[in-house]
Amino acid sequence: MQNLKPEIDEKTYLMGCTLNEAISKYCNPALIQNYQDLIHSRPAPSIGRNTKTLLGAIQSINDSLQNNDEHKTKLKNSIQALYREILNLIKNGSLIPYSYKLPRQLSDSPIGIPIDMFLAGNINWATSELVYKNFEFTGIRLIEPLKKIAEIPLGVKNNQNDLKLEEENSLKDSLKEKSLRESHKKNSKNSFSDLDPELHIDEKIAANYLGISHRTLQGYRTKGGGPEFVKISHKVVRYKISDLIKWTENKKRKNTSR
């Protein structure tokens, strides 16, 4: 059994997502749509043509039960397919599980869960909890390393040493990215004079520059009123420095009357 991975700070931990959130964020849209279709298409009770007789009524009930059983089987298979996709992303290092180990102390920091322990344990997807032998973890969050998922092929690594090395490198990359964000917040908050105005930056760095949370920035994209952005793909959004400067200039006010 591998030792527990190094601790991370609370802020980095909160950047991750729960197990259920990971399903909606990282799973194939076709799998998600199939699950939603099954949820909204529960079979209605079957009413046979000949229900006036006892045999006809029994046959109608049996048909209804059979339809429900088939639907439950399809729904179960759909859920398992979503779970498998998340587990594959964890196996190949695209997502790293972090959590608090029980019993938890107030001074505890989130720790990484070894992959073999995560895959062999009893996972509660609804509550983001894991039990493995005498280990219990609560509040599991999956953290995406710096390397994008689209660049990492799915599948299980055969060489466990390579897998462990990849996980360690991914964690180092995540911590380096966090250090870069903190440096931007400390030294360049609301100032882009030292950067190329044509440079595109990601959502979290843009939010740090503006002094707001990335959730607030996401809200602007949904409701409007925020800076212009570039949508590269379904999950990749970038902001140009010059657009952020322009947006902040338009937000300047001398009083609160407008």
Image (cartoon, grey):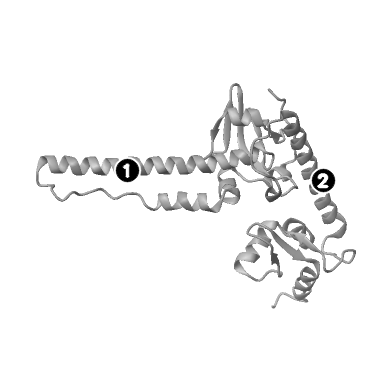
The image shows residue 197, relative to residue 34, as above or below, that is below
Residue 191 in percent (x, y) is at: 85, 64
- Quadrant including the N terminus: top right
**Do tag 2 and tag 1 residues touch (Cβ < 8 Å)?**
no
Residue drawn at (29%, 40%), measured in percent from left and top? 66
The image shows residue 255, relative to residue 30, as above or below, that is below
Residue 120 in percent (x, y) is at: 59, 27
Could you say which is closer to the camera, residue 194 or residue 80? Answer: 80
The residue that disc 2 covers is: 176
Observer able to see residue 216: yes
Residue 98's quadrant in the figure? top right
Which element is circle 2 on?
helix
Which element is circle 1 on?
helix
Q: CA distance from mark 2 to mark 1?
A: 51 Å
Hey, what amino acid is under mark 1? Asn
Q: Which mark is residue 152?
A: none
The residue that disc 1 covers is: 68
Residue 69's quadrant in the figure? top left
